[in-house]
Image (tube, rainbow, N blue to C red):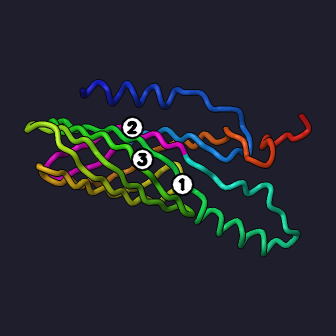
């Protein structure tokens, strides 16, 4: 199981970027390193697929109104799904598939977890609070049902690969002449 984490991380980081566009969806692979009291060094990968608001197509003619509406859209319309895999050198491995809300340089992720430790497999629920862009300090608490809860404090290093998908109104390439 421990070899699974580095292999997935390498595949995610080497994956090519989709064509650049002002698309509404983005792909963001990354690695994580954290400290977990009682479990030590934690390392793993995270992959996000995020819906982004189409800020390039909403001109009102007023810079103030455009900034206001862009801020509202970023706060209310930026969300995604996340897959996390991490492990420790002390026999703890966690898999989580969850949802996330993203605000300006902050976010919250939560979802069900499958936790493997020396005593067996357990269901869990993870909650992560993070801040940043590309380099994300984070805190995660995982409620482990039938086992010991875990806490992590660390960072993600992620690459936002934006630009796939189409709006329901129009094609979202930067070069609309094609």
Q: Residues within 10 Å of mark 2 (few under 14, many from 20)?
A: many
Q: Residues within 10 Å of mark 3 (few under 14, many from 20)?
A: many
Residue 14, horizontal then vertical, whole percent: 52, 26
Q: Mark 3 or 2 closer to N-term?
A: 2
Left or right of residue 137, residue 143 in this image: left
Q: Mark 2 or 1 closer to N-term?
A: 2
Q: Residue at x 16, y 51 (%)?
A: 145
Residue 35: in magenta span:
yes
Q: Residues within 10 Å of mark 1 (few under 14, many from 20)?
A: many
Q: Secondary structure at mark 2?
A: strand
Mark 3–mark 1 distance (CA, rounded to whole Å): 18 Å
Q: Quadrant of the N terminus?
A: top left
Asked whether the viewer can see residue 90, the reply is no
| Residue pointed to by mark 2 | 45
Q: Residue at x 25, y 53 (%)?
A: 142
Asked whether the viewer can see residue 157, the reply is yes
| Residue pointed to by mark 1 | 79
Residue 120: in magenta span:
no
Residue 63's disc is: none
Left or right of residue 31, residue 125 in this image: left
Mark 2–mark 1 distance (CA, rounded to whole Å): 19 Å
Q: Nearer the viewer, mark 3 or mark 1?
A: 1
| Residue pointed to by mark 3 | 156
Q: Secondary structure at mark 3?
A: strand
Residue 114, horizontal then vertical, whole percent: 25, 41
**Vertical position of residue 9 compared to residue 137: above or below:** above
Outermost residue to the bottom:
64
Determine the main secondary structure of the stretch shown in magenta: strand
């Amino acid at each position: 199981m421990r070899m699974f984490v580095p292999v997935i991380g390498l595949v995610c980081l080497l994956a090519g970027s989709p064509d650049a566009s002002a698309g509404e969806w983005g792909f963001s692979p990354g690695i994580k390193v954290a400290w977990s009291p009682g479990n030590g060094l934690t390392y793993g990968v995270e992959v996000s697929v995020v819906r982004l608001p189409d800020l390039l197509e909403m001109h009102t003619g007023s810079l103030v109104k455009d900034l206001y509406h862009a801020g509202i859209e970023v706060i209310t319309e930026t969300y995604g799904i996340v897959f996390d895999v991490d492990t420790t050198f002390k026999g703890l491995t966690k898999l989580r598939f969850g949802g996330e809300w993203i605000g300006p340089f902050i976010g919250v992720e939560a979802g069900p977890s499958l936790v493997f430790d020396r005593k067996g497999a357990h269901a869990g629920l993870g909650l992560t609070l993070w801040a940043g862009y590309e380099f994300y300090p984070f805190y995660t608490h995982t409620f482990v049902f039938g086992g010991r809860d875990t806490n992590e404090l660390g960072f993600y290093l992620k690459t936002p690969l934006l630009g796939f998908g189409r709006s329901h109104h129009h094609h979202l390439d930067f070069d609309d002449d094609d």
